[in-house]
Amino acid sequence: MTESDSARERDVAATAILREFQDDWEAGLRPNLEDYAKRAPEDVRREVLAELINADLRRRRSLGENPSPTDYIQRFPADQPTISAAFSAIDDTIVTEGSKREPDLGSTEVDIAVGEMLGKYEIRSVLGIGGMGIVFGAYDSVIRREVAIKLLSSKHSTNENALSRLLQEAQTAGAMHHPNIVGIYDVLEVEGAYYVVMEKVPGDDLSEVLKKSTRGFLDWKLATRIAMDCCDALTAAHSQGLIHRDIKPQNIMLTVESTVKLLDFGLAKSDQDSEKALTQHGTILGTPDFMSPEQCSAGEINPLSDIYSLGATYFDLLTGHPPFTESGTQLQVMFAHCNQPVPSVVEKHPEVPAGCDRIIQRAMAKRPEDRYQSAAELRKDLAALLSEEAPPPVAAPEEPAAKPFPWKIAAGGAMVVAALAVLFALSGLFNDRSDDGLNTENGNVVAENANQNVPTFRGVTADTIHLGTTTAFNGPNEELGRNMVIGMKSYFDSVNDAGGVHGRRIELTVLDDRYDPDKSLENMKQLFEDRKVFAVIGNVGTPTANVTSVFASQNGHLFFSPLTGASLLREDPPDRYIFNYRASYQDETAALVKYFVETLRIPPEQIAVFAQNDAFGDDGFAGVARAVKGYGIDVDQLLRVGYDRNRFNIDEAVSTIVDDKNEIRAIVMVSTYKVAARFVKRVKAAKPDMVFGAVSFVGSRAIAEEFRENGPADGEGVIVTQVVPPFMSNATGVLEYRRLLQKYNPEYEPGFVSLEGFIAAKIFTEGLQLAGPDLTTETLIDALHRINKLDIGIGPLLSFSPSRHQASDRVWGTRLTKEGEFESFDLE
C-alpha cells in the first residue's frame, strides 16, 4: 500500500468517526466522547479529538449547558492544547473564517450617533465594525484633524479581558512612533464606555486591496515591498518587547500615499511582563489562517510567531488566499499549520520568482528556531529579492529561478504564460540577421512570415497586440482607474471572442500608479521598455499625463484616449502621438459657467473654483477663467480654493467659501470624488443654497456612492458634466456597452467612466481595423487620421484628422437627486 493510500484510508476513518458522533447527537443520544476518541487513528488523534470536542461543545451549549475547558481537561489531561484549540475555534476570541463574515451592526450597541460630539471629537462616520466594537471616523475640533475612534462594544464593556485588550492596544501602540505603525492619540472613558482615539489612515486594508485587485492577488514586487514595510514595523515593536500576535492582511493598511501601516495591537503581548500579559500559555488568540504553530497549539509565543504570520500574509498577497485555506474547518487549518508542509507559491503562480517561495518556506518553518530570527533578517532577504539578488536559499533549487513575468490582464481573462517572455527575449537575437527572413526598421523587427509568434513590431506578434495602461488602481481615485479598465476590457473581450483584429487578440497590461506622477512615469518606462507594449490607452489623470504624455511623445509611442480633459494634451496643431476621445476641461467648465450665468442667473463674479493644487486643478481653473472672461470678469477676480493631491486638507477651502464677505453662490469643482463629497457636505452645512458643479473626472458613480454612504441629501443638486451620454439611455452604442459589460464583467454596475473606457476601446479597435495587418505605430496613426464622422451610436459623430486629435467636444449634463441617483438634464 502506498503512502497516499494509507493517508486516504486514515482520512476516511476519521471522517466516519466524526459523522457517527454527529449522528448519535442527532438521534437524541449522548455519545461517549472517550470511546470515540479511542477509535481515532493515532497519527490524526489530536485533530479528531479537537473536532469531537468542538462538536460536543456546540451540542451541549445548544442544550443550555456551559461546559468549561476544565471539564474536558479532567477527561483528557494530556490534551490541554488540543482542548484550547477546540474552544478557541468556537469562541469569540477568534475572528471566524479569517474575517470573511460580514460584521453585524445590530450586535454592537452604541450610545453615540454620527453628528454628535464626544468631548472635542465630532463623530462623522462609521468606518467599521468588528468583534471588539465599532470604529468611527471623527474630527478633532481643537487640533483640527481627522481621527479614528474605536469604541469597545457594550457586550464587552464588562468583560475585563476585552477591556484590558483595548487599553493594552493604546498603551503598546501609543508608546511607539513609527511611520509603519498606526499612531494612538488618546484614551477616553465616557459614562463607563471606553474609546481609543487613533490616527485615521485613508486607504484600504490588504484584504480589501486583494478583493479589489482584478487578478485577486498582488504583483510580487508590490507584495514584497509591503512585506518589507511590515518588517520595519515589527522590528520597532519587537525592539520594545512587544509581539503583535495577529499579523494578517486585515491588520495591514495601504494608505493613499502607498504607505504601509500596521494596526490593531489589541492582541499584542509584552514579552517583558509575562504575569501581566493579556494572554497566557494555554490560551489561543489570533486568526487561524495566519497563526503560527505555537499559537495553534496554545504554546509559548515570541517574536518569531509574528515572523511566521507575516510569512503566511506574504503567501496570501502573492496567491490571493492563505496557505492552508483549503484544509477545511478552522481546526483543520490550525492543525495544518502544525503538521502540513507549506504549499509552494510557484507551483500555482509560475510567474512569481522562486526566491519568494524560499523566503516563505523559511519564515513559516514549523520550529521557531528554523525561521528567520528577526524581522530585520527577513527584510534583508526581501530586499535582496526585490533587487533581483537571490537570497541565500534554504535548499538549492534544481533549476535557477525564472525571471518574473509582468502582471498581465489578458482581455480574454487568461494569464500570459512566461514562455511568451522567453520568445520576446529570443526575438532580439535576430535583429541584425537579414538572412533569416527578417529585416529591421527603426529598431523594430518586421516579420515576413506571419505565422511565426515573434514580434512583427514592438508589442505585436502574429496573434497578439499587447497594450498597456498606467492608472489609479488603488487610492482615492481607484474607482476611476478600475472602471476605465473594465470598460476597455469589456469591448476588447468581445473583439477577442469574435476572432480579434486581423487574427490578433488584444491583451492589456495594467500597472497601478496610485495617481502619482513619479510612479506613472516609472510605469510608462516599464511598459514600453521592459514589457514591450504597442501603445498605452486609457491612462487616468492630468498630473500623471503631465509626465507620461511627454515620455510617449518624445519616444514616438502612441498615447490614446486618457481619462483627462487637460489642455496639455490638446496642442494646436496636435501632437502626432497623442489622441483624445473626450471633450476638454475647457469645454466642460465653459458649459458649467454658461449654465450658472445664463440659466441660473448667478452673476459671474459670484462663481468660485475648488480645485486640486496641481496641473489638473490649474487646467480646470484656467478653463473657468477663460469662460468668465467672456462675461467681463478678470482672472484676479476669480476666487480659487483647493487641497493637495491624494489628501483631504479642505478646512481652509471650506472656511474661505463660507465666509460671507466673499458672496459666493456657485462653485466649479475640479477635484476627485472623495474630496468633492466631503467639501460639498461641509459647505452645505453652512450654506445650504450653494450650487455645485464638477467636471467629469470627479467620477459620477463614485461621488454618488460617497453621498449615499454619508447622507444622499447632501448631494442633492450637485451637477457633474459628462463627456459620454447617459449610461442608462437606450442609444444604440450605450445598449451595446451595457450588454457587453453584463456579459464579461457582470459584477460591475454601468457607469460613465466605464462607458468612456468602452468608447475609447471601440475607437482604437476601429483604427486597428483600418491600419490592416501590417501594424506599426505610424500605420495606426495614419489609419486614425482616416476616421471621419464615425457613428458608434452615442450621439456625436467622431472624427480625427492630422489637425484634429480630439474626436468629440460634446458635453452632457447630469445632476444628483436626493436619493443619490443621477438624472440627465440639458446644460444649454
Image (cartoon, grey):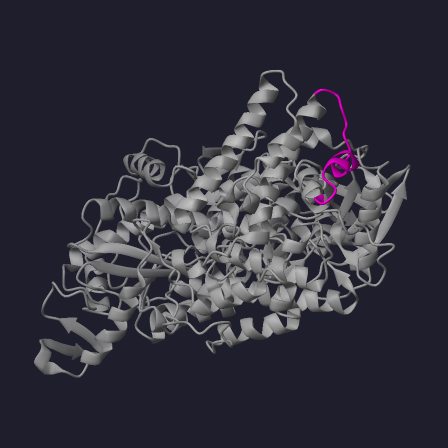
Left or right for 409, reference 707: left
Left or right for 135, reference 465: right
Residue 717 image position (x, y, % from top left): 57, 35
**What is the residue that sits farthest to the bottom in this orientation?**
432
Residue drawn at point x = 36 percent, y = 50 percent = 809
Q: Quadrant of residue 270?
A: bottom right
Observer-nearest of 229 and 673: 229
Residue drawn at point x = 39 percent, y = 58 percent = 347
Relative vertical location of residue 342 with respect to residue 518 in this rendering, above or below = above
Residue 500 image position (x, y, % from top left): 20, 51
The residue stretch that appears in magenta: 63-79
Residue 411 image position (x, y, % from top left): 31, 51
Observer-nearest of 502 and 404: 404
Q: Quadrant of residue 635?
A: bottom right
Q: Is residue 494 magenta?
A: no
State the count of labels: 0
Residue 246 image position (x, y, % from top left): 68, 53
Residue drawn at point x = 69 percent, y = 30 percent = 57
Quadrant showing the C terminus: top left
**What is the residue that sits farthest to the right in this orientation?**
191
- Residue 601 seen in render: no
- Residue 659 seen in render: yes
Observer-nearest of 513 and 578: 513
